[in-house]
C-alpha cells in the first residue's frame, strides 16, 4: 500500500476594496498637487544644503591631511560619523522625493488620497501631515478599515473620554 502526503497551503492576502466613484474633487487634487510641489521644492533645497555640507566635510578632510599637526583621533571619528549621518539624510531625502513623485502620478490618475486597502478617502489632515501616504489613518493605526468608510484622525484615548 502506497501512502501519499497531502499539504494544505493557506494563502492570506489583503483584498483591496474600491468604493464606487470615491475620489477627491479636482479642486482638492489641485490643492494637494501644489502642496506636494512645494514639499518637493523644500526637499530639493534641503538636499542641496546637505550635499554642500558633505562637500565641506570632504574638503576639510583633505585640508586636514596636509596639516603638520593632525587632528585628534576622537575628532576624526566624529567627522566620519558626521559624514555617515549626512549620507543617510541624503538617502532619506532621495527616497522621499521618489515617493512625492509617485504621489504626483496618483494625482494625475485621480487616485491620490484613496486608501489602497480600504478604498476610502484618506483624511485630509493625514495627507497634509504625510502627503506620500497610501493608507488611511484607521488602517495604519488599527489594521482595519473604518466601519463607516470614513477615515478619521482621533487623538489617543479620545474614545475613552466620550
Image (cartoon, rainbow, N blue to C red):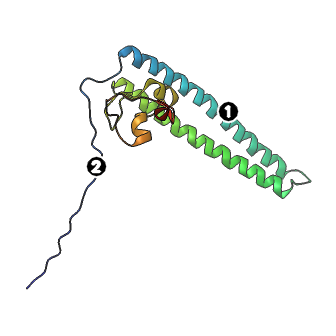
Residue 30: image x %, image y %? 42, 17
Vertical position of residue 63 compared to residue 50: above or below: below
- Dot 2 crowding, Cα within 10 Å, few <14, some 14–19, many 20+: few
Residue at 59 percent of width and 30 percent of height: 44
Quarter placement of the N terminus? bottom left
Q: Quadrant of residue 136?
A: top left
From the viewer's perspective, is 92 left or right of 21?
Answer: right
From the viewer's perspective, is 65 left or right of 37?
Answer: right
Residue 162: image x %, image y %? 46, 29
Residue 132: image x %, image y %? 46, 33
Residue at 79 percent of width and 44 percent of height: 60
Q: Residue furthest top?
A: 27
> SS for tag 1?
helix
> SS for tag 2?
loop
Residue 156 is at least partly visible in this image:
yes
In terms of depth relative to the viewer, which is nearer, 55 or 74?
A: 74
- The label on residue 49 is 1
Location of mark 2 (residue) = 13
In terms of depth relative to the viewer, which is nearer, 51 or 111?
A: 111
Q: Pointer 2 and pointer 1: residues touching (CB < 8 Å)?
A: no
- The label on residue 9 is none
Q: Quadrant of residue 77?
A: bottom right
In terms of depth relative to the viewer, which is nearer, 156 or 100?
A: 156
Residue 91: image x %, image y %? 57, 43
- Dot 1 crowding, Cα within 10 Å, few <14, some 14–19, many 20+: few
Residue 135 is at least partly visible in this image:
no
Q: Quadrant of residue 53?
A: top right
In terms of depth relative to the viewer, which is nearer, 9 or 62?
A: 9
From the viewer's perspective, is 100 left or right of 78?
Answer: left
Amino acid at each position: 500500500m502506497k501512502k501519499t502526503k497531502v499539504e494544505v497551503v493557506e494563502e492570506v492576502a489583503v483584498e483591496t476594496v474600491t468604493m464606487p466613484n470615491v475620489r477627491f474633487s479636482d479642486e482638492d487634487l489641485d490643492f494637494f498637487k501644489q502642496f506636494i510641489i512645494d514639499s518637493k521644492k523644500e526637499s530639493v533645497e534641503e538636499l542641496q544644503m546637505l550635499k554642500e555640507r558633505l562637500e565641506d566635510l570632504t574638503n576639510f578632510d583633505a585640508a586636514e591631511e596636509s596639516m603638520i599637526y593632525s587632528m585628534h583621533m576622537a575628532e576624526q571619528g566624529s567627522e566620519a560619523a558626521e559624514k555617515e549621518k549626512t549620507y543617510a539624510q541624503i538617502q532619506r531625502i532621495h527616497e522621499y522625493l521618489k515617493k512625492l513623485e509617485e504621489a504626483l502620478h496618483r494625482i494625475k490618475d485621480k487616485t491620490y488620497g484613496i486608501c489602497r486597502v480600504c478604498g476610502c478617502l484618506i483624511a485630509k489632515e493625514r495627507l497634509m501631515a504625510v502627503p506620500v501616504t497610501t493608507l488611511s489613518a484607521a488602517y495604519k493605526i488599527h489594521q482595519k478599515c473604518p466601519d463607516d468608510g470614513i477615515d478619521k484622525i482621533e487623538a489617543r484615548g479620545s474614545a475613552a473620554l466620550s
